[in-house]
Image: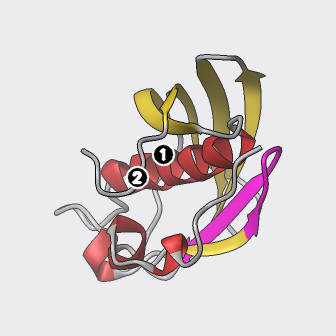
Amino acid sequence: MSTLGDGLLEKPGLDKTLSFEYLELGPELVLMTFTVEKKHLQPFGYLHGGVNVSLAESVASIGANLAAPEGLVAFGQEINANHLRPVSAGARLLASGRPLHLGRSTQVWRVEIRNDAGDLVCVSRCTLALLDRKPAGHS
């Protein structure tokens, strides 16, 4: 199994921009959370669906990289999401991801996003491709 590089999750990026927090990171379960802020809303005042998708892909990508065999790295290949209920600013959401398939060249992860009441807000499935990890400095 792979590991995430030292300090990798501390680097600037979309997860930091959107204020996602890591709770549990493992090859069989990833938990992330965040509080919906005004910056996460679409013009009608509800959580933008793209934030759900970003959260789901972050969960799946971290889990897939932790589950990937040594020397391989996982990249998102396809993602879908069903947005099941609206969410307003101030809500705290929990995303949980588990692998459905851990293959030699692909992985498939299921991610559920729930509100504080435990209601399902969004369900997503993400397929990730496993590719050879290039040494540092190579593109």
The quarter of the rendered structure image containing the C terminus is top left
Closest to the observer: 68 or 126?
A: 68
Q: Amino acid at mark 1?
A: Glu
Vertical position of residue 35 compared to residue 30: above or below:
below
Q: Residue furthest right?
A: 28
Task: Report the side of 26 relative to 44 (left or right).
Answer: right
Residue 96 image point, x, y percent:
72, 52
Vertical position of residue 47 compared to residue 50: above or below:
below
Vertical position of residue 84 compared to residue 13: above or below:
above
Question: Any magenta on residue 30?
Answer: yes
SS under mark 1: helix
Q: Which residue is mark 2?
A: 54
Instruction: Tell me the residue at 49%/31% (across/down).
Output: 132
Closest to the observer: 73 or 60?
A: 73
Q: Amino acid at mark 2?
A: Ser
Question: Any magenta on residue 36?
Answer: no
Give the quadrant of residue 51: bottom left
Q: Are marks 1 and 2 in contact (CB under 8 Å)?
A: yes
SS under mark 2: helix
Q: Residues within 10 Å of mark 2 (few under 14, many from 20)?
A: some
Give the quadrant of residue 33: bottom right
Chain part drawn in magenta: 24-34
| Observer able to see residue 120 | yes
| CA distance separating discs 1 and 2 | 5 Å
Give the quadrant of residue 46: bottom left
Instruction: Tell me the residue at 49%/81% (across/down).
Output: 10
Task: Report the side of 42 relative to 55 (left or right).
Answer: left
Task: Report the side of 129 relative to 117 (left or right).
Answer: left
Q: Which residue is mark 1?
A: 57
| Observer able to see residue 93 | no
